[in-house]
Image (spheres, grey):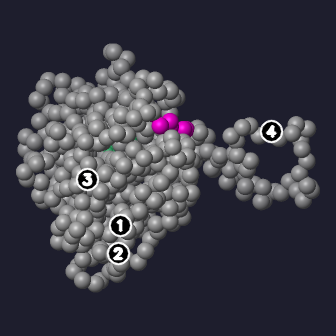
Amino acid sequence: MAVAAPGQLNLDESPSWGSRSVDCFEKLEQIGEGTYGQVYMAKETETNEIVALKKIRMDNEREGFPITAIREIKILKKLHHQNVIQLKEIVTSPGPERDEQGKPIEGNKYKGSIYMVFEYMDHDLTGLADRPGMRFTVPQIKCYMRQLLTGLHYCHVNQVLHRDIKGSNLLIDNEGNLKLADFGLARSFSSDHNGNLTNRVITLWYRPPELLLGSTRYGPAVDMWSVGCIFAELLNGKPILPGKNEPEQLNKIFELCGTPDELIWPGVTKMPWYNNFKPPRSLKRRVKEAFKHFDRHALDLLEKMLTLDPSQRISAKDALDAEYFWTDPLPCDPKSLPKYEASHEFQTKKKRQQQRQAEEAAKRQKLQHPPPHSRLPPIQQTGQPHQIRPGQPMHNAPPVAAGPSHHYAKPRGPGGPNRYPQGGNQGGGYNPNRGGQGGGYGSGPYPQQGRGPPPPYPGGGMGGAGGPRGGGGSGYGVGGPNYPQGGPYGASGPGRGPNYPQGGSHNQQQYGNWQ
Ligand SMILES: Nc1ncnc2c1ncn2[C@@H]1O[C@H](COP(=O)(O)OP(=O)(O)OP(=O)(O)O)[C@@H](O)[C@H]1O
């Protein structure tokens, strides 16, 4: 784990920063669990204000305060915008940390905890989209996209790269406001010196080709690729580039966006890992074909976001000027959006687990004690005909109760093709069988390991351990219909996936030298 240099964590800059105790807040419930610690909904006892408390994980007390948290705090302290989550203050628990029964936690006797206090948001975009029956309208998608771009434009103007844009990091409140959150991988950049950054950032499905090809000199365009992936996902109803590991991710990108050459992306052949990953045959760009059911302006904007050459990719500012946002139906006013019941995945996940356990127990019991006459044909017990409500599927009801609105406890399933509504394509009509994975770009042949220069991804080749968060289990995960092997990041990818022997999820050591 990287350690703060002396004086780097200057929590004393303003008296309120770090001087108050967490006892000023009453923890209400856990609403999230991230790489760096738990997130709680809490109430300020004096004002009754509801906030989110993000506890900074201090797993290894010898190694000091995690550099990732320092970055997040430093960056958030200088960002103030309606589409960027507001860090209100830092609070500490001075004494030894205690468990729920009030006993000091073993091995943690002399250390307090540090919490970031954020404004509270009711949902994250992934959680919201996963709610059963959730249907986003076109004006709603435009409204969220415009807020996302506005927040990101503000970050970029202030020379901050987010580097982990994905649905679960886009928080939404019941006023329809969308805010960028989780700046744990963010960093400042300067437009004249953007070299020597780590390329192992951004969750795999949202990671741009230049990072996958090993670039360490990059800028705001990396975030714009992720925005393009989210935009297409909102319109398409499911993630569009769900690679399982870095090579497959690149392969999926090439199958959709074509293979890059010096003509369309000058300099690509000089990229550090181009020779390792260049596809054996050239492929044509087929974004238009794959998403022909999107409306014309949406498709036009998407093309510009999913441009392979980062220097030609549309900026947040220009995207905000795109026809898409200025033609009917216009983006709606956030306040006009429906208010959704606040729900947090932590509880829902618990409920799901309990439900699953109960179902399994019932199954086991049934096997052990089959009911009498179990071979007889079923008899209508109530005498009532089975009614099917409009819109209700003819087969079994959805197995899961109300969906969460926070993306707690990743990985989890993308939610299937109907996760988003009829699709943000007022013209063409939503067709879950087209576009995205359904569009037929699959995994093609990939250069074999062991050929050419050493594999760029450490940990034994292309599917190596990698760096922070890169695809390791955040985002969408187990349970997606297309990932029987246990999640989109299954075999590879850095970060926090369940498959990383180094214990990805809380592994801050690997961030030691990331920049
Ligand atoms: N201000 C907030 N209001 C409400 N919920 C929040 C807030 N901040 C975070 N959450 C919830 O907690 C989850 C995890 O938070 P966050 O992403 O900041 O933590 P992290 O440790 O960086 O997580 P990750 O490993 O997903 O990157 C979010 O996806 C969200 O559902």
In percent of width and height, residue 142 lies at 40, 36
Identify the residue position indicated by label 1 in the image: 258
Q: Quadrant of the C terminus?
A: bottom left
Task: Give the position of the N terminus as an image quadrant.
Answer: bottom left
Q: Is residue 241 above or below residue 38?
A: below
Q: CA distance from mark 1 to mark 3?
A: 15 Å
The quadrant where residue 141 appears: top left
Whichever of callouts 4 and 2 sits on the residue coming sooner in the sequence is 2
- State yes or no: discs 2 and 1 in contact (Cβ < 8 Å): yes
Residue highlighted by disc 3: 313
Q: 10 Å neighbourhood of mark 3: few (<14), some, or many (≥20)?
A: many
| Residue 325 x %, y % | 36, 36
Would residue 135 be counted in the magenta stretch?
yes
| Residue range corresponding to the magenta coloring | 134-140
Residue 84 drawn at (x, y percent): 28, 34
Q: Please give left or right for residue 406 compared with residue 447 in the image.
A: right
- Name the residue tied to disc 2: 282
Which amino acid, by three-letter code, is at mark 3? Arg
- Within 10 Å of disc 4 (Cα), the crowding (few <14, some 14-19, many 20+) is few
* Mark 2, secondary structure of its residue: loop
